[in-house]
Amino acid sequence: MAEPSVKDRTLELEYYDGPTLIFHWLTAMLVLVLFAASLIWNYVTPHNRVWRPLLESTHVSIGILFAVLILSRIVWRLTGSRRLRTEAGLSGVLSRWMYVVLYILLAVEAVLGFLVRWSQGEAFTFFGLFAIPAMLPENHPLAHQFEEWHNWAAWAIVILSAGHAAAALVHHYVLKDKVLDRMLVRRRVA
């Protein structure tokens, strides 16, 4: 069996810290849940008087969690997270830009969610525990515009996330360079 190259051994010693892993996987999970809920209430049960309000209120409540998560994730990224080396060349540049664009889109999506709800003149309720009052006067044309941007940002996040996941799988199964392992397992140094 061939000994791993210096690059492979070095990557094996690198891992993301616990909070970064938690933020990453919680973000992925919430994006999927929020996107699925919006698709179901808009396309599967658009006129159902039971499921649509339930899915919409759940989406709003989880959206509040999402906003707090994204804000916390950005603060952690800027202040405390462990920075790992990225690849050189085109792959490294694309990877860095993918992260920047995804972070911007995630933050914009959270802000747009609040703007949609507030411009509808509605408060945010968090699983019925508390409400965040509307901060804007009711303006349905503006709400419609914000909702359109919110939807476009959601689709962009899902498409870029799918590309991100596909790239991780290529690294794992084709390039076999241990990049995906850093997000799955914390490697311990002996």
Image: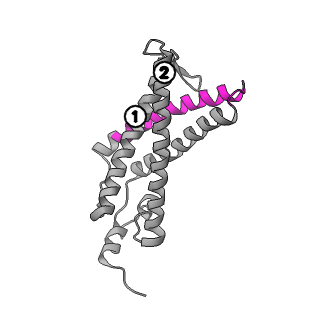
- Asked whether residue 185 is in view, the answer is no
> What range is drawn magenta here?
46-74
Mark 2–mark 1 distance (CA, rounded to whole Å): 15 Å
Q: Is residue 171 above or below residue 22?
A: below
In the rendered view, does 49 fall on the left or right side of 35? right
Position in image of residue 96 (x %, y %): 32, 53
Residue at disc 1, secondary structure = helix
Q: Quadrant of residue 127?
A: top right
Position in image of residue 100 (x %, y %): 33, 46
Q: Is residue 92 above or below residue 159?
A: below
Indicate the amino acid at tag 1. Val
Residue at disc 2, secondary structure = helix
In the rendered view, does 128 fall on the left or right side of 73? right
- Report the disc number at residue 143: 2
Q: Residue under label 1, please give it.
A: 108
Q: Quick check: marks 2 and 1 in contact, CB under 8 Å?
A: no
The residue that appears at 39% across and 65% down in the rendered structure is 188
Q: Residues within 10 Å of mark 1 (few under 14, many from 20)?
A: some
> Which residue is the extreme one toward the top?
137
Q: Is residue 39 above or below residue 124?
A: below
Quarter occupied by the C terminus: bottom left
Does residue 51 belong to the magenta stretch? yes
Q: Quadrant of residue 179?
A: bottom left
Does residue 43 belong to the magenta stretch? no
Please identify, in this view, whether the residue under mark 2 or under mark 1 is nearer the observer.
2
